[in-house]
Image (tube, coloured by chain):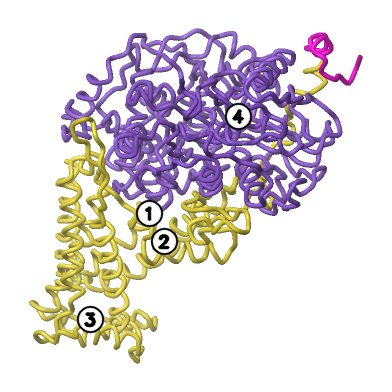
Amino acid sequence: MAIIKADKLGVSVAKGPSLMTGAVPKNDWWDVPATFKPGNYAYPAKKEIIEYHTQKTFPSHPGLFGQPRDWDPETDDWNLPDGWEKIILNGLKERLDKFRSLKIFMDCCVRCGACADKCHFFLGTGDPKNMPVLRAELLRSVYRNDFTLGGKILGKMAGGRPMTFGVLKEWFMYYYQCTECRRCSVFCPYGIDTAEITMIGRELLHLVGVNINWIMEPAANSNRTGNHMGLQPHTFKDNIEYLCDDIEEITGIRCNPTFNRKGAEVLFITPSADVFAEPGIYTAMGYLLLFEHIGLDYTWSTYASEGGNFGLFTNNEMMKKLNGKMYAEAKRLGVKWILGGECGHMWRVLHQYMDTMNGPADFLQVPTSPITGTRFDNAASTKMVHISEFTADLIKHGKLKLDPKRNDHRIATYHDSCNPARAMGLLEEPRYVLKNVCNNFHEMPENTIRESTFCCGSGTGLNTDEIMELRMRAGLPRANAVKYVREKHEVNMLSCVCAIDRATLTSLNNYWNPDVEVCGVSELVGNALVMEGEKERETGLRFEPLAGMEG
Amino acid sequence: MRILNPFIAVLALIAVGLVAAQVPGGQALMGIVLPYLAFALFLGGFAYRVMQWAKSPVPFRIPTTCGQANSLPWIKQNKIDCPSTKLGVIARMILEVFLFRSLFRNTKAEMHEGPKLVYGSSKFLWLFAILFHYCFLIIVLRHMRLFIDPVPGFVAALEFGDGFLQIGAPVFYQTDAIFLGAIAFLFLRRVMLSNIRYISLPADYFPLFLIFGIAVTGILMRYVFRADVVAIKQLTHGLTTFAPAIAAGQISPIFFIHVFLVCALLIYFPFSKLMHMAGVFMSPTRNMINNSRMVRHINPWNDPNIKPHSYAGYEDEFREFMKEGGIPVEKE
């Protein structure tokens, strides 16, 4: 779909009538219906995809994804099952009993509004229902109506709303205009986390078969082929070998990675986008060079070939199921521990959910770097280490031969991915790595990094082309901070540790900051690594000329 | 309507209090029966709500990390905003509960031409929220002189500190003025900021009006109508010693309005957003240790029947491709 030009959208964002620019809607928010039109919603899942999930992924859980069917959000008949309201309310009751977070977050909000202008979707769209407080009120109003004394007696007076088709439409619109980035929860005086609300909202929508294809199809691929791209084992391997060919051409060094090898010390898992799509593949080349450099005894897996987890964007059952492959494969191969590549939401699942859902990983050992001897006690139970932690430790111990001048053609800044920042606390490791592998590094403004970092605007399965304008709006706060350092320090490379970011920030920069590229931190590591017996490097991993080699 | 309805509701409560104070037997009802009832409902309702929350498990460890995690030994951890120990969580909670740390982070975003986003510091909400809550606390504690005999030392000290300006007789308490000012700020903010007005519900205005009513009637009683303190003390002491008695006709009606509004607040409290007072302690994004990779967190409803698509099933589907591609297989 053709999308509005950046200069025009820029005027619309800054001057168009919205709550961000001071225009207050005439009607109360509960009287403003959600209207779907091309460009403001992601396409529903194809019928056969839901059939696959119903029959193959979760035959044990009938109803988890509603009835497979064709439906069109733009019409007023979504083909919902009979008694769908009851299904939603029962689902809500079940989740109130399962999640204390949900109960507390339903009950405690005082609507102080501290969260309002913290959301990138609100900043970019000015749509009142993108204020985290109202996003939660969409669900909270139904909760009040049916689950609180005040709501049962006073109904609308107490802010209650019955579950209607209009409410369902709002949920579908606004729970898919939230990327579960948790920025609002940093500022909320009660720590109310809209990610929880959105996750539960999406779970409820699934029960009546309301979903989007961009999440459900990758989830189906992940289940069947092991990765969301749907790469079959031989293709997965071939792709990595192509990357090895490129590495050989650039460095003269041949890497020989192994696949599904039993007895390796370490299993390495990264998002499959890193082996398939630009610019992630350059990050993967960085991994390959790093492991070759230190002679790591590791293997890739084609079965557990996806770090990302589209279940996190679906429901907790799917998240558990897709994640289960990691431990299952580590056990089958008999590795000692698992090393994880650069990915944002993948690390939310690994850090906050994996051990609980699929542990205990008592068949693995506490991760210990075979090169430095460092024991990663912070991963003593989960037994999975982040590549930035691993690399930072190597650099600290002087185990890497680095020539940061090879990144002199890059003036880098660093984008904290939402989940490693706010659901893990991984802030310094990637910065330490960056400062050791490149000479030019500048931070973006402090309100836009670390725990205050802004989402790329397209996380949680929203990086689909049919909602491009929405994504460019939601990504504006991030793009704006990039623009700031580009103008001030001539930054030309936005580095990050997230596969979704690598894809989405590329689109975002092409739109708002066309001369800033995007890379994974490990790509810059790969550029800087001085390999034993290598030939003189004239280009970086993208075949781009190095500084001083341009002619 | 969102503002008017709760305002009328509070006016109605005041009217009920005023009338009830003047009908025969009304004073005993309002001064003795209702306070006991309201206090019981408050305690019972409060405990019920907390127990209802506690009944639901915390299936996953989901702290919001607001600083560097415990990682490699040479990387400086933010032990409070990203705690890896119980002690760190306690420190985080103390800062949250007593100093409203998260609210202190507040910023204000502005959209300028360009488009250009600018973030400015914005501490007013934090400041007035702190003033409001601490004044409320001090005022409640000051009232303990009416219920405890002899008056505890800390109450007397609070009173002295609160009235240190020594203006007027009886001495003017500065918390009274700050309290009214803070309530006024919180109200005006809701009305004047367009996005806050848009999100506000009757349930946001009602407690503000109610608490404002309580404060105003209290202040009037102390400085203007000069209710009979001795008779009031007799009544309040009687309540705490479970030997309540009312000296008929000695206490001004303004006192009964004040008491009636307080009772309304106590009864309303457990069923309203005011429960954030308890909720802040139980919020999983704040009160959990960020050690989920170190110590396994247990989910009581974790479903062991959810298993990944098996490797055997995967190999069965792709065996030939794997063999051709030189990828090891389990079954030839």
Q: What crowding class fits label 2: few (fewer than 14 Cα within 10 Å), some (14-19), or many (20 or more)?
A: many
- Label 3 vs label 4, nearer the camera: 4
Q: What crowding class fits label 1: few (fewer than 14 Cα within 10 Å), some (14-19), or many (20 or more)?
A: many
Q: How far, Cα to Cα, is label 3 from label 4? A: 57 Å
Residue type at mark 1: give it.
Pro
Q: Chain of mark 3?
A: B
Q: Indicate yes or no whether the magenta region holds residue A525.
A: no
Q: Residue at x 44, y 56 (%)?
A: B279
Q: Which residues are magenta?
A: B318-332
Considering depth in this image, is A221 or B238 the residue closer to the camera? A221
Residue B131 image position (x, y, % from top left): 25, 66
Task: Please tell me the numbered disc located at residue A309.
Answer: 4
Residue highlighted by disc 2 = B96
Task: Please tell me the numbered disc located at residue A189.
Answer: 1
Q: Residue at x 26, y 70 (%)?
A: B135
Hue used for the chain lettered B: yellow
Q: Chain of mark 1?
A: A
Q: How far, Cα to Cα, is label 4 from label 1? A: 30 Å
Residue A77 image position (x, y, % from top left): 40, 10
**SS at circle 2:** helix
- Label 2 vs label 3, nearer the camera: 2
Residue type at mark 3: give it.
Asp
